[in-house]
Image (tube, rainbow, N blue to C red):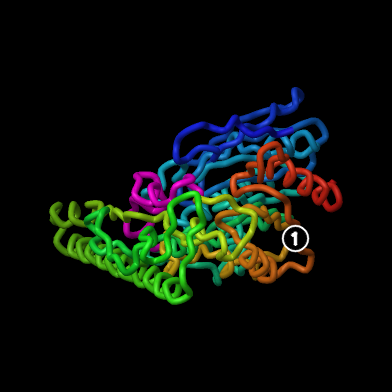
Amino acid sequence: MIVSTPPATSGIGAGRYIESAEQPTNTTTSVHELSTADGAKVTGVLRTVPGASTVIALMHPRQDLTHHVLVPELLARGFAVWTQGTRSVNNDLNLVHEQALLDVAAGQVFLRDNDFGSVLTLGHSGGGALFAFYHEQAGLATDDRLAATPAGRPIDLAGADMPVPDGAIFLAPHPGQGQLLLRLIDPSVSDESDPLSVDPSLNPFDPANGFTEPPESSSYSAEFIERYRTAQRDRVARIDAVARDFVAESGRARAHFTVSGDPADRRAALAPRVMTVYRTDADLRFVDLSLNPNDRPYGSLFGRRPDLTDYGLVGFGRLATPEAWLSTWSGLSSNAGFLRCAPEVRVPTLFVELTGDQACFPEDAVEMVNAFGADDVTHVRVEGTHFGGPIRKGAPTGASLAAAEIGGWLAQRFG
């Protein structure tokens, strides 16, 4: 049984995390360092219980899932669990999703070589789009795989061993890091060098535009919403242009170095152009609960006061290299969009929607499920918030309800 942590009495980010249960006492745990096809090192933890012939792989492009709340739940149901990080775990400054696919592949090769009867992926939140991207590329003929990142850097997916998993589970997947940020980015930033700069006509936290003091739900007009969403795309496009200029600048320096051999050109090519992207916690749906309604609480993934957290240090895509921005955070340039990749997910698939999700809304879930290329797709809805918390005080956690659905589905198909 998974229980929620005692709710904090203060703090704008209170209630985000839940505690996991104890893993079964007969669990065997081993830690493994793997080498990727391009020579990077990644680490994973394999937990098994006696008789386990099916292994579930959990990954996220940016986070350490070693202690994910579903780990003990899956073990208790007789399944082995593999939790792995990418080369960018807990530091997404230079997270390039095409490289992350090589990290996923290293784990999938390891599990295949350990002779499990079935290997499945389980993508929660951003792990959903990562695994959808992996399924897409792994299922293609090698010559059809991507050969370059959105920044134009070569990536040798064709030369990598990328086993296709036997099944796919998605728990509260959002549309992808870039597609998510496209919804969250604050278009009222009028000066990218000033985190306090505001265009009043686009300020989502101005009462003149429909904002109401929390925790009362705001109410935005259709006209404002349309202008706001258009301006969000415009801001991402502007940042894309800056990122591509930086990439081109580095490319010119590399080209000069090949001719000149001058260390100054080499230094210019290596110098990081780190981009700071302010204010990325401003989806109107966080504060206007009438928009795409579900059971979500007021607030964002980062806390109960988006009007404050939007200005904070913690946030999606806050610091990124140009390559990482284009590959991961740009909803206009990234290849790792869930809907783009889902048609190539062709194995038995379970999609678990959480009714109080703040990142995957009901119409998103329907669109994602309809996009899968698999013949065997199951869509279930359970009460819970995005990270698996309870929908209301005293209710079961979303994680425990999801675990029951996942366990039943696995038993029917991979028991």
Is any atom of residue 96 visible in this view?
yes
Please, is residue 259 above or below residue 392 in the view?
below
Crowdedness near tag 1: few (<14), some (14–19) or many (≥20) residues, C-alpha within 10 Å: some
> Is residue 317 on the magenta stretch?
yes
Between residue 363 and residue 299, name the one nearer to us. Answer: 299
Q: Is residue 118 left or right of residue 103?
A: right
Which residue is depicted at the point 74% across and 39% down? 74
Residue 255 image offset from top left, x and y in percent: 22, 65
Q: Quadrant of the N terminus?
A: top right
Which residue is depicted at the point 59% across and 30% down? 6
Residue 95 image offset from top left, x and y in percent: 42, 52
Q: Which residue is mark 1?
A: 379
User: In what element is the residue under mark 1?
Assistant: strand
Q: Amino acid at mark 1?
A: His
Read off the magenta span: 300-328
Residue 218 image offset from top left, x and y in percent: 48, 60
Between residue 61 and residue 316, name the one nearer to us. Answer: 316
